[in-house]
Image (cartoon, rainbow, N blue to C red):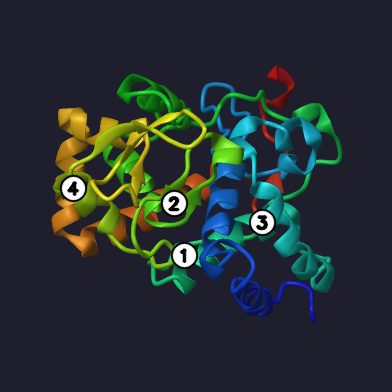
Amino acid sequence: MAAGDYNAVRDAIRKIIPQASYDDGSAGPVLVRLAWHASGTYDKASGTGGSNGATMRFKLEAGDEANNGLEYARKYLDPVKKQFPWISYADLWTLAGVVAIEYMGGPKVDWKPGRVDDADVQYVPPNGRLPDATKGEDHIRSVFYRMGFNDQEIVALSGAHNLGRCHAERSGFEGPWVPMPTRFSNTYFKLLLRSQWIKRKNSVGVEQYTDEDNELMMLPTDMALVKDPKFRAWVEKYSDDKDAFYRDFAAAFGKLLELGVVRGPEGKAMRQYARAKL
């Protein structure tokens, strides 16, 4: 394939999303999570972290507990990288998230190529920059404000919990948020508001919230979105207005994928201006 044929890359990504032996038969949710976590290390004050560099290729970042399980996503994408060696891992991981969202019925997210891969570990951002699911609204704001997001964008991005499930051996939490975890929707927001959530200890003794039938779950960070009045207003908005959620999610996720990408005049990412501050 010719270098720069991103439509061919998109087609190849679609082909690896069905995975009969993985969660609910789909790699889609974990591809979204890979794109999210590869980008969500950004710190606007120092200009460090973010999607440029693909630093999760290195053990220092891959070993962050928040990234447990993402080795599956990277493994599923390895054949695509071999087929298209000209694409950077940084572009491949972010593009895979965009393709997976659309594949699962979600909105089209704007995406631009041009990210580059770092050659060594010197630019790996510090561990601990990703959200801690055991925390509340103050922690959520601290993490997302550091990246440059506001309350509305925080709630919109939280809607990614329409996808996938938690695994006790990875995060300590277990179970899906919604009944159809491979279809993008606003069901997450509806369930947050309309279901009765009961705090229980799961099979490994970690406290989480489950519905009355103990089939679905919510994290403490999810419950913080309905506890905090400013967050709750957006939860109610997205529960009632699917189109608004899709629009706002697409904008926020596109913004997330561009964090840490400083582009030159031809669109190719440059080395981050403040990386020496790490």
Name the quadrant of the N terminus: bottom right
Q: Mark 4: few, some, or many residues within 10 Å (few <14, many ≥20)? A: few
Dot 2 and dot 3 residues touching (CB under 8 Å): no
Instruction: Give above or below for 8 relative to 85.
Output: below
- Residue 129 image-quadrant placement: top right
Marked residue nearer the N-terminal end (3 or 4): 3
> Residue 87 location in percent, x, y?
76, 63
Q: Under tag 1, what secondary structure?
A: helix
Rounded to the nearest angstrom, the CA distance separating label 4 from label 2 is 27 Å
The residue depicted at 45 percent of the width and 26 percent of the height is 143
> Residue 113 location in percent, x, y?
64, 60
The residue depicted at 35 percent of the width and 30 percent of the height is 220
Residue tagged 1: 101
Is residue 78 left or right of 153 when viewed as pictured?
A: right
- Residue 274 image-quadrant placement: top right
Dot 2 and dot 1 residues touching (CB under 8 Å): yes
Residue tagged 4: 195
Determine which of the numbered discs, if any, sits on residue 253 in the image. 2
- 140 or 264: which is nearer to us? 140
Rounded to the nearest angstrom, the CA distance separating label 3 from label 4 is 31 Å
Q: Under tag 2, what secondary structure?
A: helix
Q: Under tag 3, what secondary structure?
A: helix
Rounded to the nearest angstrom, the CA distance separating label 1 from label 4 is 25 Å
Q: In this view of the protein, can residue 83 be seen by the observer?
A: yes
Q: Mark 2: few, some, or many residues within 10 Å (few <14, many ≥20)? A: many
- Residue 107 image-quadrant placement: bottom left
- 267 or 201: which is nearer to us? 201
Marked residue nearer the N-terminal end (2 or 3): 3
Determine which of the numbered discs, if any, sits on residue 266 in the image. none
